[in-house]
Amino acid sequence: MSIEFFLDGKAVSAEPGQTIMDAAKANGIVIPGLCGDPRISKTTSCFVCVVKDKKTGKFLPSCSARPAPGQEIEVTTPEVLDMRRTALELLLSEHTGDCEAPCTIACPAHAQVEEYVRLIANGEFEKGLAVIKERIPMPMSVGRVSPRFCEKQCRRNIDGKPVAINEFKRLAADLCYDSFMEEIPADCGKKVAVVGGGPAGLAAAYYLRLQGVAVTVFDAQDDFGGMTRYGIPEYRLPKAILSKEVAHFAQMGIELVPGKKLGENLDLAELKAAYDAVVIAIGCWKASGLRCEGEELATPGIEFLHSVAVNNNTGKNPGRTLVIGGGNTAMDCVRTSVRLGSSDVTCIYRRTEAEMPAEKIEIAEAKEEGVKFQFLTAPVKLEKRGTKLILTCLKMELGEPDASGRRKPVAVPGSEFEIEADTVISAIGQGTDAPAGVPVDRYGNLAVKAENTTRVEDKIYAAGDCAYGARTVVEALASGRLAALEIAEDILNKAMPAENSIFISRGSWQEMSQDEVVVLRNDLSSEPRVELKFIPLEERKNSFKEVCATITPEEAASEGKRCIECSCSDKSDCKLRKFADEAGCRKNAYAGERQLASYDLRHPDIVQDRGKCIKCTVCVKVCKEVVNQSLLSLQKRGFQANIGTAFNQGLPLSCKDCGACIESCPTGALDWRKKR
Amino acid sequence: MISPDIKQIKIGLVSCGIAAGGEAVYEKLVAAAGNIPVIKVGCLGHCYAEPLVEAVLNDGSSIFYGNVPGKDEAIENILSLGEAGRFSVPEKRREKECVKVLAFAGRIDPTSFEDYVSGGGYDGLKKALTMPPEAVIEEVKISGLRGRGGGGFSTGMKWSFLAAKDSAEKVIVCNADEGDPGAFMDRSLMESVPHQVLEGMLIAAYATCAAKLIIYCRAEYPMAIANLNIAIDQIKANKLNIIDGREIDIYIKEGAGAFVCGEETALIASLEGQRGMPRFRPPFPTDSGYMGKPTMINNVETFGNIPLILREGGAEFAKVGTEGGRGTKIFALAGDLEYPGLVEVPMGTTISEIVFDIGGADPEKVKAVQTGGPSGGCIPKAMFDTPVDYDSLRSLGAIMGSGGMIVIGNDRCMVETARYFLDFTHRESCGKCTFCRVGTTRMFEILERIVAGKGKVEDLDTLEELGSKVKAGSLCGLGQTAPNPVLATLRYYRDEYLEHVNEKSCRAAQCNALVDIVLDQSKCVKCKLCIKSCPVEAVSADFIIDPDKCTRCNSCVDICPKHAIARIPKGENK
């Protein structure tokens, strides 16, 4: 006799003995649960699977409760979902671990760093490249010019230098780019126009193409790559390398149309009519002025770099050169000036070196190449005297911190002085040259609807620098990918993949002690970081040759052993993370004490991590009821309750390493010690 | 000189009497009493008067002596029936109490089978054995007896469920895992009249055709276990355990002290040798309990009522009490009152009768009463007219529980009270259910922050939200009731919480972080005792207390002979 009852008002029937969860599943409603396993008796402990009995008002664990005839069960009402979310948030509040490694969290594209480093170190270059390209579709470029957000958060910083993560990207891409090709699905019948062929536009095109969308990319320049081609100098990113990447996009079936500029020979309204969606990724090409008298006499930095790029890395010797600004563009300008033959290049910056936004390595390399720096100096007037330019400057001193947290430079009265130069380049910032008819925000960037979206208005998306101001290549790629996902959601009705918003982290290395860094692998290398091979300094100063070489596979193999492998061994199938993501859990809803991470590494192959345990006791029952061993038990009471072994002696010799407990663990509290 | 009128002398020497120093009194009495028998008896419930000695006279009357010191003069005074130190039950208590279940307690030697039998013990069992088992259950149903362990389920109904099971291996368990702080009714009954509990169990075994009787008693009750074991041996010697030709197995299982084992499915797991953790019901224990056998669990006091019901009949029993509960209820009174101890009153007696008339608490100094221990809630003084029975207490957000009643004075902080109870329950969670294990911990942490002056006003909403979810999302009674003290204090004393979070002030001057210790110079006689007693040199040579150094340890407050030093809520000194 089947039992008739109601699930969210819908009449359903259950077989005798079926739980509410089983009956719901049979009717297409999957109720999440963390503490069940079909092979063992009920644990009824996690309470994530709660449902509500409408009549009695009682919440029932659906994994254990059986329906009664006529019972009205609420499964997806807001109240039930709230209760379920609270159960998960409480579990998260006592959960410690690293859902993702700090490098992945720091990466703007959230690339699976640990995975590609391991693959590439093991010589699986093509697989490693595939992992990289899941998030970074221009790995040859990023592998050369990335400011290495990942490495700054690498926990190896605690005891020395970070793993040379970016070199792995470059190696795998350099080795495999010719042979590597993505699988492109059949055309889905939708087409998208991308305006702007820089990294953001190309990334949007790339990820749309992987959905079977027909994509056309328009660019105002003669060639593709945007700022990576016309802004980043040859010695950092050779044009031949970039062209290889651009060619790859074309090979994927992405149509690349050069020489088309929005508002000139390209009309937004027409694009909107002709395509299912339009991505605007036009970058930041408007240079900011010096904001002082005579500013028009200065050469804008991006124009300077552009002219060198289009002239095949040639140009006239700029003579005595002053570059004003402290960012990466300023560094590109000073180093390019050196390469054009100038022997007297000075960077002028109004704060000190510590406040410079440019990458430390860029500053160091510029100094090596003979560039001089004049800090705490601000231009007040530029004028022409004869053939020379005269820049009048003021001495500055650092005052109170400003909105950016950096100490604000304050002029020292009466400290004016003059510097004579042949060329003055302004590199103090870039803005968006927004096309007509698109809404802009107060900074002049295209106005997206909210943070973390690229949606502007119906069918219009904005990605990359033009949506948020000048930033890095990898950020542009991430933004382009987001645009592609959002478009797929909007025009293909494809749900966006869960972006794993739950990043439980043990913290950043800056606030950790060495003891707190958990090392599971027993072959961690203590070798120093791989040394990059630079071309001779004279060659650097006199040519646009790439300054350093790609590391070798042997170097990668050895460098890979320096990776701590911080991320949770169970991150790909952790049920807690999955359900918490699905339930929209807040990260720190109920802050409080956590059980200290206590790793039990006494077993050679199995690691027990109490900080990750949610005390569901499934492992206890599996070992007892399935394996017939009873090697694990729940011990202590209250918040201190945890899974332990007899007399805390660790897993005994009688443990056959069958792994049943590991397979059944919903989190990474029990796992194989060696990551696969 | 020993008075010739004395027939025998009784002294209360179960746990409470021993704790009060009764053994020394007993030794001296035995040495001095000559031929007069000195008998160790159980507890009369007057904890405040222990050690309590009764001189039984030849005419059958008695003279009591309370708080008897173990000194020769005191012994001589008793033996000569002196006037000093005489004790009589406070008049108001005598009017209100109704001693039925505890009638034997403190009157007989708990280890004497004959004492129990001669007072009418086992008459109930005898009578039951003359009736068909169904008639016995019917009698229990008529009595209206409801489970005294806290749940309040009809005992007769419960018995009928077990009786209906077709099994030769039915089990009856006496739940003697009395774990509420401040509750000691069951202990006292088992120590003082173990046979009464066992008689109730034997009657149940007959009525339901059970084969095994187990008493699950916490190991912290050694005397209850000792006295019960003596009584079990006596039952076996007298073959009272052979019913209808069946030999009933009776034994005690000692619990290891987990509060959660008072919950029936956790108790069964513990009996089976498993970790004491509750499980989902159904199956209910009557379908599948101890070792999968049909099992029924009743509380100690519930069994203690059974012989009475059989002796006087269910209808007579039901004449006492109210609609919400029949018979009497034993309460353990503790806290800020004059006469702490055990008291048995008819169901429906009001809280104010119990607290003021019987307990002797000062109405001016009382703020609230906590019923049901850590699982219960507080009831403010304004509601003391409420009659005590299962349903009315529940409607106030409290519970009857097993019968603990803690009187809370005006100088107690309600936030601290809630924190105190949650400190207990959050540690005693078995760790199984997420809401109970983590939820109560998070609530406890919030309360710790509030009493430390670090609370925020949003914390109160979080407490209420989490509290109701913990209640709804826990498998057993522990989690389902653990938030009660917090929710009840939030309901009735929200203003105290708000003062803690908004004004960083504790009106009861109890929370150390929100209290200042001040010295009233006008009362000070400059004796320097405060300076000497201070462990952190916070009192200066000119008698000023440095609030930054002071740890609020109270040494100076306690030692000051002129009461010139006081704890006051922070901020009131300005």
Image: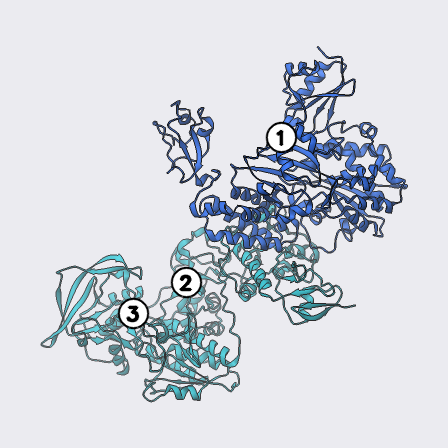
Chain colours: A cyan, B blue
Which disc is residue A311 wearing? Answer: none
Report the Cα–Cα distance between label 2 and label 1. Answer: 73 Å
- Marks 2 and 3 sit apart, C-alpha to C-alpha, by 23 Å
B499 shown above or below A282 = above
Image coordinates of residue B141 in percent, x first then y, are 80, 46
Q: Are marks 2 and 3 on the same chain?
A: yes
Q: Which residue is mark 1?
A: B339
- Residue lying farthest to the left in this orientation: A386
Q: Position of residue A131 (x, y in %)?
A: 48, 72
The chain containing the residue under callout 1 comes to: B
Q: CA distance from mark 1 to mark 3?
A: 82 Å
Say if mark 1 contacts mark 3, CB within 8 Å.
no
* Residue receiving disc 3: A328
Query: What kind of residue is marked 2?
Result: Val
* Labels 2 and 1 in the same subunit: no
**Number of the front mark, 1 or 3:** 1
Secondary structure type for disc 2: loop
Asked if one can make out residue B180 in the rendered structure from this viewpoint, the answer is yes
Give the percent coordinates (x, y) of residue A104: 45, 65
Residue tagged by mark 2? A163
Name the mark nearer the viewer: 2 or 1. Answer: 1
In this rendered view, identify the residue nearer to me: B178 or A538.
B178
Instruction: Please give the chain letter of the residue carrying mark 2.
Output: A
| Residue type of the residue flagged with mark 1 | Tyr
Q: Earlier in the sequence, mark 2 or mark 3?
A: 2
Give the SS element for disc 1: loop
Q: Nearer the viewer, residue A382 or A232?
A: A382
In the rendered image, which quarter is residue A423 located in? bottom left
Task: Assess disc 1: are there few (<14), some (14-19) or many (≥20) residues with their C-alpha within 10 Å of its C-alpha.
Answer: many
